Image (spheres, helix red, strand yellow):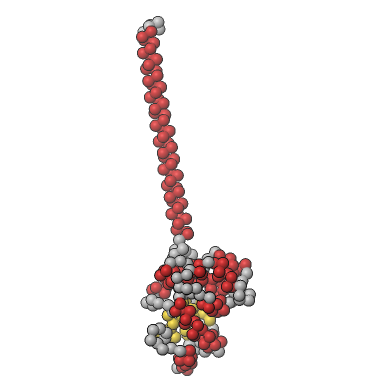
Amino acid sequence: MSENNPEGKRAARDRLQAERERQRSRDRQRRMLIALAAVVGVLAVVALIGMMVGGLDDDGDDDEPVSYPRGAVGEDRLTLPVGQADAPAVLTVYEDFRCPACAQFEAGFGKTINELVDAGKLRAEYRLVRLIDGNFGGSGSRNAANAAACAQDAGEFVPYHDLLFRSQPPETDDAFADKGRLKELAGKIDGLRGKTFDACVDEGRYDGWVNASDDAFAESGHNSTPTVLLDGESIYGQGSGLTPESFRRLVEDAGTS
């Protein structure tokens, strides 16, 4: 083809222009595919991270590692003992710090229990659960139980346990979910409040232990709180007619049998 042929030159330019357009189109498609692949990859990573973080943040995660309060005993170390190990009678109490019936039990029998423990006639074993959290939602049962376990580390479980029940909010009020409130109450007990206790409460050090204790309660066959057992036999509940005086006699009789 002659270079002096105008028609030939135009045809060549048109072919070159068309080829350039096709190349630009291919380049755009390639860039779009690369960008799309990058977006899909990022979304996949974000989703994976979200699932991992969600698993870590789940308040009800029963698989989180378990740390044990100082002195915890029994099967799976889920019991907080009070009193002499060789006391002639053993009282097992399943309690929830948000449970009104538990607060009523403590108001009626707590003083007698403490007196019998101090006299060496009774060993009390407390099992802390979070039944009300499940019934009404929230985390006050768990947070209060964790704080009580932190008090156990400091050797102040009994006074803090008793104070929590005396300070109990209405059942539907999740006030114990506020860790600041739990620390404020601890300040009323000499020697309890401090950096160690506060850190234990803030980080939920014994949340896994509380969850494990609650799981064991669900598997125990008991379904309400308080569940109160004297040497393995239920003694408190609807129609039991138990009084502090009759409870004292039961304990003393158990110690002589």
Residue at 50%, 75% in the rendered image: 168
The percent coordinates of residue 34 (x first, y second) are 42, 36
Q: Quadrant of residue 232?
A: bottom left
- The image position of residue 204, as x and y in percent, is 52, 66
The answer to which quarter of the image holds residue 183 is bottom right
Confirm whether residue 255 shows in the render: no
Whether 103 is drawn above or below 37: the answer is below
- Closer to the camera in the image, 73 or 169: 169
Numbered label tally? 0
Q: Residue at x 49, y 85 (%)?
A: 109
Residue 159 figure quarter: bottom right
In the foreground, 164 or 44: 164
Q: Is 3 displayed left or right of 117 in the figure?
A: left
Instruction: Determine whether, in the image, residue 83 is placed left or right of residue 239.
Output: right
Which residue lies at the image location 45% right of the left edge and 75% below the top edge? 99
The answer to whether residue 64 of the structure is visible from this angle is yes
Give the side of residue 158 with respect to residue 48, left or right.
Answer: right
Looking at the rendered image, the quarter that the N terminus falls into is top left
Q: Is residue 68 depicted above or below 246 in this figure?
A: above
Residue at 42% x, 47% y: name it.
Answer: 44
* Residue 192 x, y percent position in the rendering: 61, 73
Drawn side of residue 63 relative to residue 162, left or right: left
Residue 10 at x, y percent in the picture: 38, 12
In the rendered image, which quarter contains the C terminus?
A: bottom left
